[in-house]
Image (cartoon, rainbow, N blue to C red):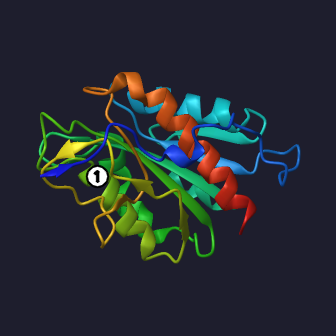
Amino acid sequence: MHKAGSTAATAYNTRKPISLTIMTDTAQIGLFYGSSTCYTEMAAEKIQAQLGEELVDIHNIKDVPLKDAEGYDILIFGISTWDFGELQEDWESSWEDIRDLNLEGKVVALYGLGDQIGYTDWFQDALGMLHDELSILGVHFIGYWPNQGYEFAQSKALTEDGDYFVGLSLDDENQFEQTDDRIQQWVNQLVDEMQSI
């Protein structure tokens, strides 16, 4: 079973979030999410607030086609895992559209929501599935997240060495009190990674 310390990605927790100085006044980050119970949407809004509302356009994939993602150079995708490793319903409806996207060379970060206690064998599986689909398209991933501070049995969202999730891992079911700090740390990490590209 994966079990680690109580904090994650402490390297960024001493800094306040900052807006990207490399951006212009036109939004250049597209954040696309699917949400059934509002938690993935709430996370999207928090990420937008941390990066700067003027820099991030939020899109619910229930209302817009994934094709719109092609209009951004930097993308953030949010997805939740349902039941026994299932996709969130809006992502499931759009799944076959992913491989038709022209995202080669785009910078992509992912975040996922899951339940590490109730579905410990499938924690963040949808996040891993989305990562696998997008990797075929030749994108450049940023925002991998340490697996410290979680307790679960298995996950498709881990890197090959098992040390990181392929994106920010949130568990509002069991660790809601850590969500805001995790988002802040992750956003600061994204800023550093984007500015070093």
Place of residue 58 in the rendered image (x, y in percent of width and height, measured from the top left):
61, 37
State the SS at label 1.
helix
Q: Residue drawn 88% across and 49% down?
A: 24
The residue nearer to you, when weighing 184 against 67, is: 184
Place of residue 7 in the rendered image (x, y in percent of width and height, measured from the top left):
39, 39
Q: Residue drawn 75% across and 60% down?
A: 195
Circle 1 packing at 10 Å, graded few (<14), some (14-19), many (20+), is many
Q: Is residue 48 above or below residue 110?
A: above
- Residue 140 visible (yes or no): yes
Question: How many numbered tags mark residues here?
Answer: 1
The residue nearer to you, when weighing 179 against 98, is: 179
Residue 75 lies left or right of residue 5; in this view the side is right
The residue nearer to you, when weighing 68 against 191, is: 191
Q: What residue is pinned by disc 1?
A: 126
Q: Quadrant of the C terminus?
A: bottom right
- Residue 71 visible (yes or no): no
Place of residue 88 in the rendered image (x, y in percent of width and height, measured from the top left):
29, 42
Q: In this view, does 181 lie above or below 122?
A: above
